[in-house]
Image (tube, coloured by chain):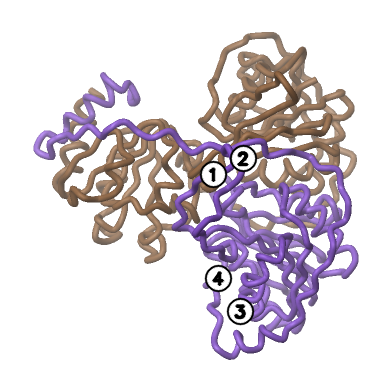
Chain colours: A purple, B brown
Amino acid sequence: MKILVCMSVVPDTTTKVTFTDNDTKFNTQGVQFIINPYDELSLTRALEIAEKNGGTVTVATVGTAETDAVIRKALAIGANDAIRINAEPKDAQFVSEQLAAVAKANGYDMILTGRESIDYNGGQVCGLLGALLDWPSVNVCTKIDIQNGRAEFERDIDGGRQTLSSSLPVVASAQKDLCEPRIPNMKGIMAARTKPLQVIEPISTDLASTYVNFETPASKQAVRMIDAENAGQLIDILKNEAKIIA
Amino acid sequence: MTGIYAENSEGIFKKSVLEAASYASQISQGQVTAVCIGQPNAGEADKLAQYGVNKLICIDGFSNFDAQTYSKELAQAFANNQISQIVFANTYEAKSIAPRVAVIMNASIASNVIALPETSSGFKVKRGVFSGKGFAYVTLDRANKVIAITPNSTELKENSTTIQIETISATQTTAQTAISSTSKAGGKIPLTEAEIVVSAGRGMKGPENWGMVEDLADILGAATACSKPVSDMDWRPHSEHVGQTGITIKPNLYIAIGISGAIQHLAGVSSSKVIVVINKDPEAPFFKAADYGIVGDAFEVLPKLIEAAKASKN
């Protein structure tokens, strides 16, 4: 089994999001960067599958040299090697086209992604990769396994859950509940220093979209407090003043 | 021309599909064509017509969902009808198909879109980023465009027309995936589509106390949700977890009970139109993000709310 795990490097979940340069850039000042939490799940599950069935796990990310520290963390968790495509991740389509090129060049049995990144929240890379490679793709998986040469999944669907299987190769995306993310241990951290991190240049593509500017949500008006003794009054306010319930 | 993917939920076009129809008819310069897999129930096509859809194409021949083959057939149908901009409601199903359709049609794609585009120069959409902590304005630069809109974020605008229905047969239905079972939480409102959400956190003290939360939700016609610690402790299924690493929701009304309001939780719910916070700690950070607040014990406040909500129904 050759497994490719696609990793996004994102701001820590406690980050207070602000923008700079006339709101055209995310303000990275003082921001701690981490492995996208869903990608951490796909990495852990890939390692579990490789350990059980034999195989290797490669981590790939699109990013500049600043992401190397986070890539080393993925190697410390247990990935065999890493590939960094040396470019700013411009949008989901750019990232997917780069990752698809890596997949075509190296050949994998399975590609795992997160269900979305917690910064741009596109949730598209799994499907984009599937179509670019013409492989099946299975979204938001809470279970991923290999059984008799086929991949088996459990995934979230709108208002429920589904069990399904697929031929290999396949692309799948990780949802919470897939596994408990692994934490690097000292041995892993030491080993990560010498594991291969290959840096390659991006292929040229025509950009699909342009991020023009950003804004933060409008701040709320002061909260209106209701006395707990007369809590029932809230229902009246929601119905007759806010007109938000029937 | 403009098209939509009309997700067929057991014969029904849900509100999110009608929102996609309304969005499409507002950006369309002419006809709006909807494409669905299988046949909808009688009368469902008229719901689309009410929001400006002139034509519905039903693709027959599939027995099971499969992202790869569905997207190929859809892209083919859109291309055959000269459709260059396609609107999806951003459900789980759409998330698995829309990017594939975009690749096949060499289109630009944006998901989590929450407003009509600005088209004075280029085609610029507003989308949610940083899990509710920000918004981005993005231009879609390719001739073909796929736009996946967040349910409950755009206006439903009536634009009645007449609809013509056409059925075609799928040509490629051999899937590489095989579905063995599907379970749906019967009768429950999916969280992402709910207009009212009643959510609770650690303040409920244990899963055995969720009856009150569900009672209030039932009376209000709401979906139930929970905070991350609650889903981590398995008090509630993770599918109810709203927040930065859970589901981002945008209901008209979000009622948070016994949730302190950590930044990660706020990220997932701050786009709700009206937020009510009930917490016994007056210093809970959530009050700063709330429209209405009650400082009090959930076990005393909830029964009062349930009683008042029942009374207001009658």
Q: CA distance from mark 3 to mark 1?
A: 32 Å
Q: Which residue is mark 1?
A: A19
Q: Amino acid at mark 3?
A: Ile
Q: Which residue is mark 4?
A: A179
Q: Is residue A7 visible?
A: yes
Nearer the observer, disc 4 or disc 1? 1
Crowding near the residue tagged with mark 4, few <14, some 14–19, many ≥20 C-alpha atoms within 10 Å: some
Asked where in the image residue B201 lies, by quadrant, the reply is: bottom left
Nearer the observer, disc 4 or disc 3? 3
Residue nearer the viewer, A77 or A18: A18
Asked if the residue at tag 1 contacts the one at tag 2, i.e. Cβ–Cβ closer than 8 Å, the answer is yes
Q: Is residue B10 visible?
A: no
Q: Which mark is residue A77?
A: 3
Asked if the residue at tag 1 contacts the one at tag 3, i.e. Cβ–Cβ closer than 8 Å, the answer is no
Vertically, is B255 above or below A170?
Answer: above
Nearer the observer, disc 2 or disc 3? 2
Vertically, is B264 above or below A76?
Answer: above
Nearer the observer, disc 3 or disc 1? 1
Residue B224 at x, y = what percent? 38, 45
The answer to whether B16 appears left or right of A168 in the picture is left
